[in-house]
Each structure stands twice: as structure tokens, then as C-alpha cells.
Image (cartoon, rainbow, N blue to C red):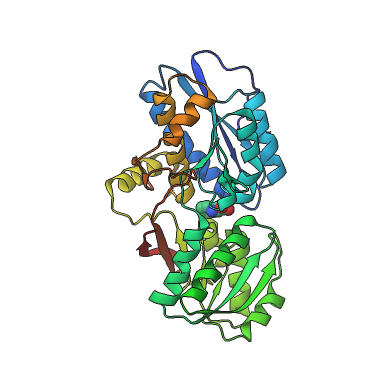
Amino acid sequence: PQTAETKTSAAPASDTIVIGHVGSMTGNEATFGQSSDNGMKLAVEEQNKKNGIKGKKIVLKTYDDQGKPEEAAVAATRLVTQDKVLTFLGEVSSSRSIAMGPVADSNKIPMISNSSTNPKVTKDGDKTRPFVFRVCFIDPFQGTVMAKFAAENKKWKKVAILRDVGNDYSVGLANFFTETFKKLGGEVVDDVSYKAGDQDFKAQLTKLKSKNAEAFYVPGYYTDVALIARQAKELGIKVPLMGGDGWDSEKLYEISKGALDGSFFSNHYSPEDTSPQVKDFIAKYKATYNAVPDAHAVLGYDAANVAFHAMEQAKELTGPAIRDEVEKTKDFQGVSGKITLNKDHNADKPAVVIGIEKNAPKYAATISP
Ligand code: PHE
């Protein structure tokens, strides 16, 4: 993996604490890693201004996994063995977090995923992974959110699905959506596949077009979804698309060029939220990065702060001692809401539904677990 900073690693000085971040800083999902890193850096700066942790300065070490699960596992191992991190943060994508989890467990170093939502991230079969946590909700809930929104708010009866078969997140979300949508009396009229990075989706879209669906559920990542939306429009498909948090990127709007107007997706946060935490964070983020934070920035910031809080509470600065404190996280006030980690190491939090109007995101609803 490439290191985002060009510094070479050395054993950490005794007056510093090194925290790792593994993210997609380049590649098709580059905004995921970059925004997360921006949020984490803000948290580190603030904590260092407050005298760090137990008087030690925090150093954030970021590795780019280029969006590849194998690279994510290698980067996590390097953080632990070479950089001697006490905790590492990431990934955004579930497939990459699933690859990193075993590294946390076998080295007894806590991992906190900022925004991976597939249940398998914190589970090893039926067993909760002892050293793996996340600060976000999971997909059985997220799938339910859009199924309810479709069936109850929109009164849609027929939905077609287009899923990314190589992506644990996309496959999981498509399944969870289907389960709830059927329970609510809806019908999934067709369910077809694509692979991340495909350029031509016309065959699948043409097939779906003939099925009289009232909407398409497309739980993928923003680059593919934006292309799908444009090609759907070219084929004369008028139905709205629905998706999940994987849509959240400013690039979604840039690439889709308005083709997603009238569509909806579930997410972790809305910049229109008027809570003091959100307003304050947006102001700080804008002052530093000259941009409105997306969900990754918010969750990256929250994940880092949950780690810092645990380190402050820990009896000693070792992986197991920090882990025990992360596990106790309760009512921790984050920007994305209050964070309490349940027995499966997941956060139960409300989701927001975002609508797209005039090629811009617009808050539509909040749905609680
Ligand atoms: N939840 C997605 C996953 O698990 C990642 C993601 C989170 C994407 C938030 C965008 C916004 O793969």
C-alpha cells in the first residue's frame, strides 16, 4: 500500500500515540477514503490541542488500499506490525473491513470501522469479533429503511433490483431490502446483477424496463450508480432509483448530471440537520476544507473520537485495555448522533432518507430503528 504521507515509518516516540487509518484514497471510491481521512484529521487536531491523550500527542498514519480488499488487509497488518498503532480506523467499504477484521483480532488491536454496514464486519460466523467495532448502523436496518419508505411513504408495490454481485455490501442490502419489502406486501419484479467498474448497463436496464416496476433499487457505490442513472435516462426509463449510503459522494451529482432527479437514498446524516453538533461540525469542516462534509467525514470524525475517549478511559495504553473501553461506549455524543455500542459491537442509530432534486441532495425523512 501507498502511504498518504511520504514519511517513512519508525517506531513511535514514547510521547506519541499512533492511530491508523486504512482507506480508499485513490480509485473508483476515492472520495470515501479522502473524506473519512479529512474527518479523522480534524478530530486528531482538536484532541492534540486539548493536550492529546494522557499527555501524549496523537499521530494519524494513513494507508491507501486503492479500493482493494487484499490491500486493505496488508495495510492493516503493516499498521500493527510496523507502525505499532494502538487502534486503527476504517474501512468504509464492507468488503474491505471484512478483510481487515481478522488482523485486529489476531493482533489484539481494536479496529473501529467508520461506515461499513454489512453485518459480517463485526461477526466471524455467529461469533462477534472481539476487537472489531463500528460507529454506524448495519444493513438489515438500512435495507428496511428504504423498503418501508418505498412501501409506506411512496406506496410502491413493484420494485426491480440491480445489484453489484462482487460487493458484500450491495448483495446484503439487496437481500435485506427484498425481505422487508415482501413482508410489507411489495413485489420484487426482477433482480439483476452488474460488477463494479462495468461501463455498459444497457442490457440489464433494458430487461428491467419491460417489468413495469415503479422504482429500481440500486444499492451500489456512486460511480457505478451515476452511470446506471445516465444510461437509464438514455433508454427512456422514467422511474426513480433508490439506493443506500454508497451513493453518498459529491461525485454522484457530477457524474449523473441530473439523471438522478426524483431518486432517493438512505444515509447516515444530512447536512440540513439543525442540531448544534452538526452545525458546528459543518462550520469547522468548511473552514478547513472549503467543502460541505459528507457522511464519511462525519463518521470518520466520530470514529476517531470514540477511539480517543476509550484511550483516555483505558487503564493502560494497550490494545486489550483500549478494546474494553471501546466496548463500553454508551451515549457518546457524536456528530452523527448518540453512539451506544450493542453486544454485536454495532451502533443503533436512526437513518435519514435523502431525495435528489435539481441534481442536489435534499433531506426527505428520518427513520428510527
Ligand atoms: N456502507 C457502505 C459499505 O458498507 C459504505 C459506505 C458508507 C458508503 C457510507 C457510503 C457512505 O460498504
Q: Residue at x 42, y 80 (%)?
A: 155
State the image quarter where residue 305 is shown: top left
Image quadrant in which the N terminus is located: top right
Q: Quadrant of residue 97?
A: top right
Examine the rendered structure and indicate whether residue 217 appears above or below residue 350.
Answer: below
Image location of residue 30, percent across then percent down:
60, 48
Judge left or right: residue 292 versus residue 250: left
Please give left or right for residue 23 compared with residue 354 in the image: right
347 horizontally vs 252: left or right: left
Q: Looking at the picture, how far across and down is residue 268, in whole percent?
A: 43, 54
Residue projecting furthest to the front: 126
Instruction: From the top left corner, tell me how far across and down residue 8 is, in percent.
Output: 66, 23
Please tell me which residue lies in front, 291 or 89. 89
Q: How many marks?
A: 0
- Observer-nearest residue: 43 or 122? 122
Relative to residue 330, is residue 83 depicted above or below?
above
State which quarter of the image contains the C terminus. Answer: bottom left
| Residue located 47% across and 70% down the image | 147
Q: Residue at x 44, y 76 (%)?
A: 151
Is residue 137 visible in the rendered image? The answer is: yes
Q: Nearer the viewer, residue 78 or 135?
A: 135
Q: Is residue 44 visible?
A: no
Across and down, in percent, residue 216 comes to 56, 75
Frontmost residue, 110 versus 72? 110
Residue at the outermost top position: 14
Image position of 128 with respect to 176: above or below = above
